[in-house]
Amino acid sequence: MYATFLKAQERSPSLVLAHAGIGDAGAHEIARHLADSQCLVHLDLSGCGIGPTGAGHLAKALKINRTLESLVLQHNRIGEGGEEGLAELCRALRGRTALKHLDLRHNGLCGIMAGSVIGELLRHNESLTHLELSWNALEPGGGHSIWTALQMNTTLFDCQLTSCQIAEETLVGIAELLYRNRRAKGANMQAGPYKALPIPDTLRRGRGTDTGHPCTGDSAAARAVAVTPERTAELLERLAAWRIAKRDQGQLAETARVQELMGHLDQGQRELQEARRATEEVKEHTRLLAEGFQARELRYRGERSAAQDKLVDYENEMLSLRAVHRRLADQLGLQKDRGEQAGPAALAAGDLRDGPPACGGRGGQRRPPSAGVRRSTLRFEGSLGGRGAVSRGRRGPPRAAPAARAR
């Protein structure tokens, strides 16, 4: 079905069939092309409806191919029906030395099983630098499996996990491990989208034009036309000599064309130098930003450590205050119990000092008034000029005075 098209792409370093809808059958033909290709570097099969069966076909081809650096399989159905297709693909990538970029976004990969399969790939692969897993419901269990595997991986620099339902602390741990790998491998390896090179390193290392390789001619030509100020000056000198020769021959039209070409070369060289200068400025700016970020990171880590120490001190102080509070509460409780026990005894002792209880008091007995309380009321009664009488008794209205005796 795609044989004619694939035949025409034999020497192409890139093959893009995004949203072509080739399905598993088309993936089988692509897999045969991939197994036979010695030039393919970048393969994009986004949105092609590839399921576990198609992933199995590609896995068999990946075991044979040694040039592919970037494989894009986003928006497919590899995770449908379980992890069988993903497991075959990951097993084929173990120990490979060429593949650097794998894109599995939107593939229905779910749960801890998918995370475990990807974790096994990371444990045994030493070439993969960029892995994209966004929009797969890996959940906290799958994220933890990837974090555990990354602790034994030193080559992965970037791992995209957007909307994978992974715990925040797990994402932070994964980011720290990726940063560790970048620092260990060199500052030039920064996180971010993977950019495939048009000519793979595997084809450039140790191969010349006399090897008969179908892709080495392009790389040799690319090296031969490198633009440098010296090369441009040499071309301008040759063009100037050729222009003088044409002018002496009277070919003024050719002279005008040479003059125009020299102007383009000179302008292109100036633009190239300006672009290189801007590139150096961007690199320097990036370096300063990175140094500033690292300095802030170290400062923030120090501040966080100091804050954690303060929290520990506050916690210890709180524990000591709680101990003091409990001790004082216990002492207060003991004093309260002693007061409750001593109260009835004190009341009984007071009753004994005061004598038997009065009527209506305890025991129903009537207590006579004491001598200090009992008193007599003296009242003087009598009329003017008569004898007064002293009576002792209850208080009440005065008695009427007796009638005066007649003299």
Image (tube, rainbow, N blue to C red):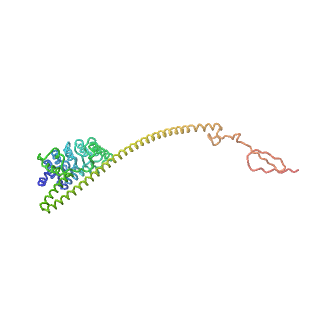
Residue found at the very far bottom of the displayed protein: 253
Q: What is the quadrant of the N terminus in the image? A: bottom left
In the shown orientation, is residue 10 left or right of residue 100?
A: left
- The foreground one among 273 and 39 is 273
Q: Position of residue 349 (x, y in %)?
A: 62, 36
Q: Position of residue 72 (x, y in %)?
A: 21, 51
Q: Position of residue 292 (x, y in %)?
A: 34, 48
Residue found at the very far front of the displayed protein: 248
Q: Is residue 49 visible?
A: no
- The foreground one among 311 and 197 is 197
- The image shows a total of numbered marks equal to 0
- Which residue is found at the position 13% from the left and 60% from the top? 248
Q: Position of residue 356 (x, y in %)?
A: 65, 38
- The foreground one among 107 and 297 is 297
In the shown orientation, is residue 142 left or right of residue 243?
A: right
In the shown orientation, is residue 207 left or right of residue 108?
A: left
- The foreground one among 296 and 226 is 226
- Which residue is found at the position 75% from the left and 50% from the top? 397
Q: Is residue 374 visible?
A: yes
